[in-house]
Amino acid sequence: MISTIVGALAATASVVSFAPQAWKVIKTRKTAELATLMWVLNVVGFSLWITYGVQRGLWAVVIPNILCLAFSLFILTMKLVSRPTKHAIADALDPAVDSKR
């Protein structure tokens, strides 16, 4: 029982930890300071964890890693796309921010 609670808390913390970075990218539209290799490795790592979890039938591993992969892919995409595309994506997600920054 305790290990289930610890696992759930760990999964929640892992998933939630990506939200501030994703939100900052949306708000500022800035990604120059982010290390591309780190986000590529995150995407690869989460993809491998998902594969491992599916192969082992460990849905408690699969689900949080799918969510972390989604955040990582979003941040990596924002890092790699052109500035106008980045602004268009961010504007769609948060139109309240002045896109002329």
Image (spheres, rainbow, N blue to C red):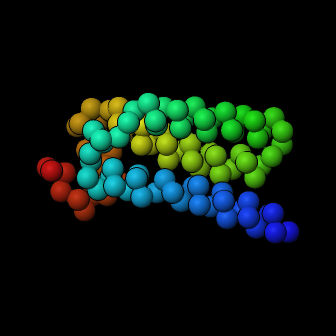
For the point 44% across and 43% down, the residue is: 74
Place of residue 4 in the rendered image (x, y in percent of width and height, measured from the top left): 80, 63
The outermost residue toward the left is 100
Q: Position of residue 22 (x, y in %)?
A: 41, 52
Q: Position of residue 30 (x, y in %)?
A: 26, 45
In the image, what residue occupies the spot 33% across and 45% down? Answer: 89
* As drawn, 29 above or below 23: above
Q: Name the quarter where the N terminus is drawn.
A: bottom right
Q: Depth check: 83 or 58 in front?
A: 58
Give the residue drawn at x 18%, y 56%. 98
In the rendered structure, the answer to whether residue 38 lies left or right of residue 69 reads left
Q: Is residue 92 visible?
A: no
Any part of residue 11 in sight: yes
Tell me the quarter of the picture where residue 9 sits: bottom right
Residue 60 as seen in the image, left or right of residue 98 = right
Task: Please give left or right for residue 1 compared with residue 7 in the image.
Answer: right
